[in-house]
Image (cartoon, grey):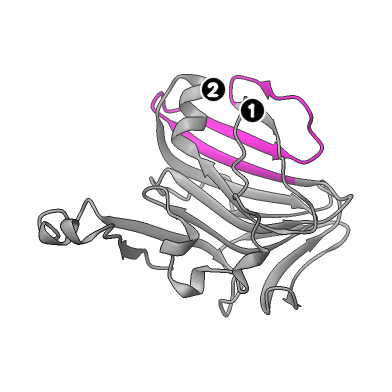
Amino acid sequence: MPTKYIKVVKNKEEKKGEEREVEKNIKKVNTILCSTDNYPLAKWAKYVKSGYVKRVADNEIEGKVIELSGTANGVWIALPKTIDQVIGIPYPWLFFIIKAIPEKQLIIDVQVLDSTSIKRTFRFDTKTTLTKLRHMLALVDLSIKPGFWTCLEMDLIHLVAKNYNTRFVQLCRIQIHGSCKVRRVYTASSYITQEELPPEYKVSPATNLNDPPTKPTVT
């Protein structure tokens, strides 16, 4: 899906210098997964050993969503389709509009490339209680309230710098395991609030999003 350019002008004074500040005030957003697209998983790999991956109607948000049902080892989706490819997006903010299922495990793997040309994977897991840091893998507690639609935020610059003392370069791969519902996955060139997003990026009604949004970080 093409990148969206969202101009954010905070007050009237900023409008005076709008032309020369246009690049500064534009936030770029790129959708990785949108459940309402005609073929939302066309570019994603899908694995189902037990359970299912399908698009279903969600009455709470009044729209179609992608539902994964099964164990973390039995069902997953991943982008890109093969491990020798990369997403290649340099935007440092990653967002998931997602709902965890009560008493079911949810794992989200986010692989990035850092300034030492090493691919690091952050594994966010609802069943992990302690953070474990390894050379190329960080195991992280995914503190997300099950049963509620959540805007899950990931500051990739912060995660890479804090845990590996290197710089984030680009997003390489995303893999979602286990049971959950997904509305949208997108990246942004800088932090962006729900109010700044175009209408099609918002979950309706917006009150279904946890406030404040969940921001998983490695501690």
Residue 73: percent from left, percent from top: 82, 46
User: Is 168 left, or right, of 67 in this rendering?
Assistant: left
Amino acid type of the residue that numbered disc 2 sits on in the rendered structure: Asn
The residue lying furthest to the front in this view is: 12
Instruction: Indicate the quadrant containing the C terminus: top left, top right, bottom left or bottom right.
Output: top right
Task: Count neighbours of disc 2 (C-alpha within 10 A) and say few if under 14, some if 14 to 19, many if 20 or more.
Answer: some
Task: Count neighbours of disc 1 (C-alpha within 10 A) and say few if under 14, some if 14 to 19, many if 20 or more.
Answer: many
Residue 91: percent from left, percent from top: 39, 47
**Residue drawn at x 61%, y 29% as measured from the top left:** 218
Q: Quadrant of residue 10?
A: bottom left
Q: Which residue is mark 2?
A: 163
**What's the magenta region?**
107-136
User: Is 19 left, or right, of 70 in this rendering?
Assistant: left
Q: Quadrant of residue 142?
A: top right
Please name whichever residue, 177 or 102, is drawn nearer the observer in this view of the structure: 102
Specify the label residue 173 is tagged with.
Answer: none
Q: Which residue is mark 1?
A: 138
- Res 160 seen here: yes
Residue 122 colored in magenta in the image: yes
Amino acid type of the residue that numbered disc 1 sits on in the rendered structure: Ala
